[in-house]
Amino acid sequence: MIEEFLAGNRRFVDEEFNKNVDFYSDLSNSQQPKILWIGCSDSRVSEDVITSSKPGSIFVHRNIANIVAFNDINIASIIEYAVTHLKIPDIIVCGHYNCGGVQAMLEGVEEHYIADWLLIASGAIAKAKQVADEMKLSRKEHLDLLSEENVKLQIKHLRGLSLIRNLHKKGSLPRIHGWIYSVESGEINVLVDGYNHEA
Ligand SMILES: [Zn+2]
């Protein structure tokens, strides 16, 4: 029920906020997040919980299947604010296994908006299908591969945005990292190492 969330907030105030008044007082004046997180809306993939991060650390954009869309002014404005104003040096695109969005990519979906949205990942669908056919992957392996290929494709989209492309042309930040989270083990694996990627 919804009351449990308000009760949870009261516990947060008593057990966390009021015990770290200096930290939250500093934070109330300004934010200096260290990363921009582009993740899935899935309720099991809470970026601050799975990275043991406090408020103020992560600037966040989440959508179905952690997609970077060229024509999405929402994500574009978040990236622009993160990079230009907050000067965030690292962007992480974090996908996850057992993703309902990725499953819908593979199986198709009836709902109009969701189908349109997932079309943006069609390059990853084709790539994963080709490998799955060649390697005779199980359905679970195919889905896991598609989750990974989707992260790589969204990084390609991110690098292709004119804002990012122009910064990289000048040799400037941000670094772009690709991660994948396992809802079964709680672990994050690095798919794309932003420190070693050629801009
Ligand atoms: Zn998901």
Image (cartoon, rainbow, N blue to C red):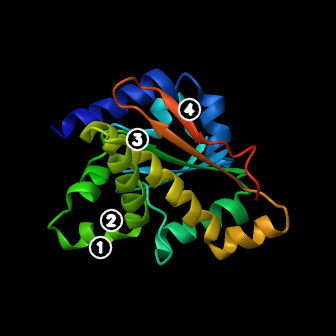
Please name whichever residue, 2 or 57, is drawn nearer the observer in this view of the structure: 57
Q: Nearer the viewer, mark 4 or mark 1?
A: 1
Q: Are marks 2 and 4 in contact (CB under 8 Å)?
A: no
Question: Where residue 30 appears, x then y in whole percent?
Answer: 67, 50
User: Which image quadrant: the N terminus?
Assistant: top left
Instruction: Tell me if 169 is positioned left or right of 65 in this view.
Output: right
Instruction: Tell me if 191 is positioned left or right of 143 in this view.
Output: right
Q: Is residue 162 above or below residue 78?
A: below
Q: Which residue is mark 3?
A: 96
Disc 4 marks which amino acid? Ser
Q: Residues within 10 Å of mark 2 (few under 14, many from 20)?
A: many
Q: Which residue is mark 1?
A: 116
Disc 2 marks which amino acid? Leu
At mark 3, the secondary structure is: strand
Disc 1 marks which amino acid? Asp
Please name whichever residue, 82 or 131, is drawn nearer the observer in this view of the structure: 131
Q: Which residue is mark 2?
A: 118
Q: Is residue 84 above or below residue 61?
A: below
